[in-house]
Amino acid sequence: YKLVGVIISEAMFSTAVVEGKKELVIKKDALQKKEAAAIETGRDDSLYRVTSLNHLRLSGFAGLHSISSKIGQISGLQQLILAENGLQSLPEEIASLGQLKMLDASRNQLHSLPRAVYGLSSLQSLLLGHNCLEDASFPVVQDKVFLPNLHHVDVSYNQLTLLPVMCYKLTDLLEIGAMDNAITVLDPDIGKLKSLKLLQLNSNKLTVLPSELANCMKLKTIDFEGNPLSDRRLLKLIVQHGSKKPRSVLEYIASRAPKSSDQEPKSKGGKKKSKAKDAEPKRLPSDSENDSEVEFSVTAKPIVTVSKPSPLVEVCATTLARKVRPYIVCAIVRGLDLTTANSFQDFITLQNKLHNGVCKRRRVATIATHDLARVSFPLTYACRPAEEVSLLPLGWAVRGTTTARGLLDHLEANRPSRNKKAKSLDASAAALSRYLEFINPQEMVFLMDSSNAVISLPPLTNSEHTKIGVGSSDLLLEVTSGESLSSCKGVMDALVLAMSEAGLQCRGSSGGLCVEQARVVDQEGKLLVLYPSRLDLNTDTVDVRRP
């Protein structure tokens, strides 16, 4: 249920109250100026009377500096999305939102957080990126138990010099995003986060890493690129293996990084304690061993040949799709040979690595690849409510066609929780359920071919109809993003370069990849994106040959 392209009135909200609506999406750019101004100034706060809501999204209101204290009346809220406004603070009354699972206040002007945030016992995701938060913006943690279910924290693109203290105390955290700040020190308490799987601290000011980081045994992705690390060998390891083999990075940190304390613990008598295991010297890898793992090999550069076919493959991006998930980039790879030993599996593996690495677990972008022979052109990038999108999701050949709503319900039913036994869950659906927090069921973006078949539903899945296999030769590459065009193109660059550097080749291409340009246009036919253009694929690691 959304208020888009209509006049907001008190009567309309009254109707929503009577009907017991569960979801409400309000965007400024779809409203008339008078009604938008009423929300920004607080003159119209009737939306807070829709107390049946479990999903509320309010975005695009640059003049909205605060949220009414009446937000606490919507006690059943599970998702509160306040991204892309002008908020400078959040009300203490959010403490009443005891069922809230996701709070997204990213891309605002927040200077502080209310202590009430720590009382949100059901909260799983706290998104605070792109704000004005400083170290003092976070209240002092006074309670021993707080935010017991929080798994994901994002404080990227702020003004922090330290990672918030609360992060070190939440020992069940799975993901921490704190890129593009000014963080200079990582506390040794980071080693207490034994469940941590993702740590993004790229583009900060870290010079050393504590050896305690090696205690985070479950880390799958480590990103410290763009930091002035004094250990150049460590920096190379991170670049090479941070998203592929994080364990090798952790082992190196454990053996070489400086300890957090210069003194060993002393006994009551003043003498240093000694333990048998401490008496055994650690085996440090030799320089030759490290060099063999770290140094870049010197080989002939892989070749990528770019061509401009006539006519170009074209994607029409509708206005609504561009408002919800604005950016899409496509390209064609011709004659790819996936029949050689392990080449097909290598291709699937590198996509998964990119999703976990440069795509930041699909938060930045999502990659989709299709068998071109099964796609009919032109393509349309569109948006509809979940009930109106019909598709055959990847892996659903037996279940058959469903709606996007049916898929969402299936993923929700298989979302892992303490009350569900892992053996009873659909493993594939359980893995995809982590991305449900990115979805608004009323605004499902999808890519559709000329036969009206939905071939992808980002960021969740592709279609079984266009699934690639060992026999696939010509591929359609697709990247979508809600963040920026540069991020979208950057991921496409990473995909093409990863394919080339992995040794994937096109038949008859002298050992290289053949990439054809594709264009994205708006509904009036105006060019939005051409990829790859002369500004794309600019790298020293691959020989790019252009028309």
Image (spheres, helix red, strand yellow):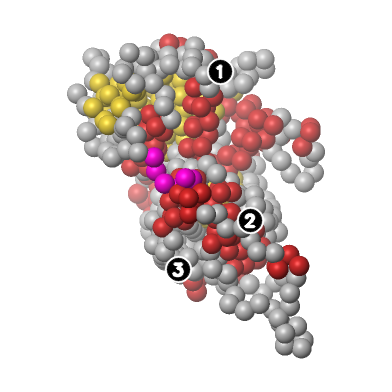
Q: Nearer the viewer, residue 201 or 6?
A: 201
Q: Please tell me whether mark 1 or mark 3 is closer to you in this view.
A: 3
Query: What amino acid is labelled 2 in the image?
Result: Cys
Element class at badge 1: helix
- 193, above or below 311, in the image: below
Q: Quadrant of the N terminus?
A: top right
Percent of width and height locating residue 520 = 31, 27
Q: Which residue is mark 2?
A: 216
Q: Residue at x 49, y 11 (%)?
A: 471
Q: Image quarter for residue 517?
A: top left
Element class at badge 3: loop
Instruction: Please tell me whether residue 58 belongs to the stretch shown in magenta.
Output: no
Answer with mark 3 or mark 2, whichever residue precedes in sequence.
Answer: 3
Q: Residue at x 43, y 11 (%)?
A: 373
Query: What amino acid is labelled 1 in the image?
Result: Glu
Q: Quadrant of the C terminus?
A: top left
Query: What amino acid is labelled 3 in the image?
Result: Thr
Q: Which residue is mark 1?
A: 464
Element class at badge 2: loop
Answer with mark 1 or mark 3, whichever residue precedes in sequence.
Answer: 3
Percent of width and height locating residue 442 = 53, 35
Percent of width and height locating residue 247 = 59, 49
Image: magenta residue range: 292-297
Q: Which residue is mark 3?
A: 184
